[in-house]
Amino acid sequence: MGVNDRVNDRVNNRVNNGVNDGVNDRTNNGTNTGKNKRAEAKHKPAPLWLVAFSILLPTSFSCLATSATNVAIPHISGYFGSTIDEANWIITSYMIANACLILMSGWLEGLLGRKNFLKIFITIFTLGSLMCAVAPNLNLMVLGRLIQGIGGGPMTPVSQSILLSAFPREQRGVAMSLYGLAVMVFAILGPTFGGFIVDNADWQWIYLVNVPVGILSVSLVHANIEDTEHLKKAKKTDFPGMISLVLWLLSMQVVLDKGQQYNWFDCAWISWLAGFSACSLAFFIVRELEASNPLINLRLFKDKNFFIGTILSPSINMIVFSTIVLVPQFLQNMMGYTAILSGYVLAPRIISCVLMMIVINPLMKIFDNRILIAIGFFLLGVSVLFFVNLNLSISFIYMAIPQVLMGVGVILTFIPVSSLVLGTLPKSMLTNGASLHNLCKSAMTAIIASVASTLVARHSQMHQVYLVDNLSDFNLVFQQKFSALLGTFMSDASSSFATIKTNSYLYKSLVTQSRLMAYVDVFATFALISFLLIPLAFLFDTGNKHKKNHKHKVIMMKQIPGDKI
């Protein structure tokens, strides 16, 4: 019996252990399955529309801040008791900070992680906006704009890379349509928005509206944007490249802003600063090509689509922002329009842009993108060509009609180019490529803001030299006009005073006509540039060719020494 008891005990123990083990395994498996399901639910990616909204909300307001301030400069300078030249540093400081941070965005994103990076810089942008609104003097206002530019600079390239990474390849047209809405449409909306604010409220509200938007954006980014694995290891910092970049952009912007005021290279310090800017740029290029851990990968220009797109996109910015600067300037200075009325002239461009956003994605699926880009540049050229017929009796409707064509042309060029320019780069290089691409666009925007006004001033002086020959006693038309005006003024003034007043009136007319002809020259130049860019659209590569070469390009780019993105 003892033996049987021992046998029964062993059997019972084994059965009980087996049952218990089975129960425990099923319990543990059920517990682990529940935990895994909760973890999967917790880390489930947000819907694409929510990801797009979360990143494009702060991006759109950073682009709005670029152009909304332009129409408010006279009001801001009057508020602080400064000159227009001094107040222009409000624009300059933002442009410099914006351009510097655009190129650093890839490195900073790798250093901080995507989510923390976005939350930090949205907060900086919000604090800068608040500082601008409460600034008691011009110096703090400029500092606030500098901080605002630091926060807003990385938004554009990072949002583009996030959208291209999040959306499937077949939906990249939709992604770039949303990106164009945030970047281009809101930048065009800036003068209208700024004009409405300064004519109906205090100019401080241009900056205060960014505060609640910034708070909401931080919450949305925290909830919906996730880090990507390849960004969690940051490469070593290229401080010499970073410093040379900042020095180049700072010195270049000062030269462009102050060159006309100090007669360009007739001024010694402008000449020295221009030389220093050129040397800083040369050092930056050599440094980035030779460094083992470059701040930016300049060898991305070896990619054909990236190279062509980085020529065309800044050119689009040049044409669009030249009209954003010059059209309100012409209307306010020469036609007597208020800030809000000059903004309303640009409003049809916004409407046509939004309408084109709806149809651009189907068009990109039906037609060759290169044809759309070519048509877009043609429409841009035609719209700018309308302004060649400017005169001082021009109607509101005539100024508004080309804005419709401009809006259509902007979307037909900007969206396909944005889709193609980064479409052939590997995903690991999208942030780096977007940073370099957007730096070129921002640099062109900063340059054109200064160069456009300089071209008008220079051509105005040139036409004045030619037209003054007509103010001669040997010109019968001038004699008749002079005599008629002199008779009019002598009816209520002495002969000597009437003569002075007549000469002043005619000289004012001469200056006005010279400036009008200068605007015509500048618009004709930009129209010609638009038409000359049409053939470049057909240099893009599309179709399956990239799929065959994609693997080879990734290998070639990874062979770059020290290129860890």
Image (cartoon, grey):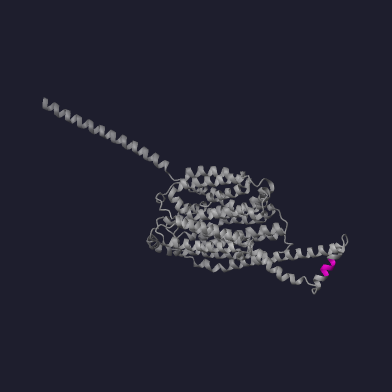
Of 326 and 425, nearer the camera is: 326
Vertical position of residue 472 compared to residue 395: above or below: below
**Which residue appears farthest toward the bottom when viewing the image?**
474
Camera-side residue of 226 and 125? 125
Number of dots carrying numbers: 0
- The answer to which image quadrant residue 22 occupies is top left
Residue in view at x 28 percent, y 34 percent: 24
Residue 413: x %, y % from top left: 55, 61
Q: Residue at x 70, y 68 (%)?
A: 463
Magenta range is: 480-484
Instruction: Name the residue located 61 percent from the left edge and 54 percent from the top edge.
Output: 89
| Image quarter hosting the C terminus | bottom left
In this rendered view, identify the residue nearer to me: 420 or 189.
Answer: 189
Q: Is residue 491 left or right of residue 351?
A: right
Q: Is residue 204 above or below residue 459?
A: above
State whether residue 55 appears in this view.
yes
Residue 464 painted magenta: no
Q: Is residue 43 left or right of residue 394?
A: left
Q: Position of residue 121 (x, y in %)?
A: 51, 47
Please determine whether, in this image, residue 123 is positioned above or below residue 461.
above
Q: Residue furthest right?
A: 491
Percent of width and height locating residue 429: 43, 57
Q: Residue furthest top?
A: 1
Q: Decide if residue 185 is in sight here.
A: no
Give the left or right position of residue 165, taking residue 330 as reference. left
Report x, y in % for residue 253: 57, 58
Give the main secondary structure of the magenta stretch.
helix
**In the displayed structure image, the side of residue 495 where residue 97 appears, left or right:** left
Q: Quadrant of the N terminus?
A: top left
Quick one: 492 or 526, which is closer to the camera?
492
* Residue 360, quarter of picture: bottom right
